[in-house]
Amino acid sequence: MSSETLSTRPVPVLPAIVTLAWRELVRFCRQRTRVFGALGQPIIFWLMFSQGFQSVDLGYAFQFPGILAMILLFTAIFTTISIIEDRNEGFLQGVLVSPVPRWAMVLGKIVGGAVIAWLQAMIFLLLGWLTIAEIHPSITSVLAAMLLMMVMAIALTGLGFYLAWRTDSSQGYHAMMSVLLFPMWLLSGSFFPATSDSLIRYLVMVNPLTYGVAGLRHYLAPEATIEGGWLPSLGLCWAISLAFAVAMIVASTRVVETRTKGDLK
């Protein structure tokens, strides 16, 4: 077979995506401390927040979607630390010189990390749904919330991928995340509504995570509304969340296609 025939043969992309995503899951399962943390964190949050928020005026039902968003955000972001490790160890350099397109590598890594974050948030969702009296959505609403959670996980993992690719060390990544994560989470309407016409309200409105939290609130706690509070429509929540996910995948693909110092390590 000639070299021209080999060069023009289409490269199977789906197996590459599945393999990279599966590698993330296998790596996660082999690290016992990560598995312990993934199982323990939702249970601890469930035990602590289900009791602590009973005395809060807003109620546990209002806070529940925000806690889900917090689990998705922190797990998705910190899962992408493996990007830095894979670059330093030379694994991603081997992937980059393979005939597989770079967007397939990006999608495989993002899907793998998003599934891990989604599964961890699912534990908390099921615990709250089955045991907390204030959380009583229908099965249809729970299924829709699960789908929205996956979209959020893909978007947040894509954000982590983009930032990790532009960072040379895990220490720098942690420092950058501490500056970004908490404002993004706190300004998403997770724990306090944007009721006043102030700068905080506009920051909440431009935060893409706000619309994921609001969508979960529509599905899981539609009665937990605050008088004067701003709650976007369910259609807008889906539109912004999907646009956020697509934008992060595109941005991650673009940054991978740009040659950086990390490519030369």
Image: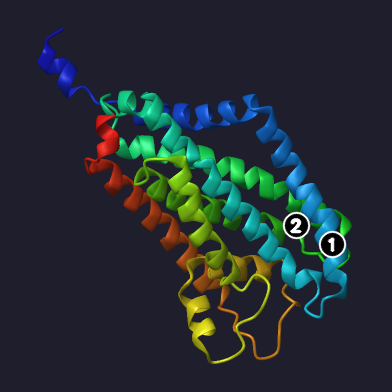
Q: What residue sits 42% from the left and 32% below the top? A: 17
Cα distance, mark 2 to mark 1? 21 Å
Q: Closer to the camera: disc 2 or disc 1?
A: 1
- The kind of residue tagged 2 is Ile
- The kind of residue tagged 1 is Ser
Name the quadrant of the C terminus: top left
Visible residue check, residue 144: no
Q: Is residue 234 left or right of residue 124?
A: left
Res. 14 image quadrant: top left
Task: Kindly identify which residue carries mark 1.
Answer: 50
Element carrying mark 1: helix
Q: What residue sits 85% from the left and 54% below the top? A: 47
Q: Is residue 57 left or right of residue 7?
A: right
In the rendered image, residue 25, in percent from the top left (x then y), is placed at 57, 31
In the rendered image, residue 142, in percent from the top left (x then y), is placed at 71, 57
Which residue is at the front of the view, 14 or 251? 251
Mark 2 surroundings within 10 Å by alpha-carbon count, few (fewer than 14), some (14 through 19), many (20 or more): few
101 over 208 or under it: above or below: above
Q: What residue sits 36% from the left and 29% below the top? A: 92
Task: Kindly identify which residue carries mark 2.
Answer: 139
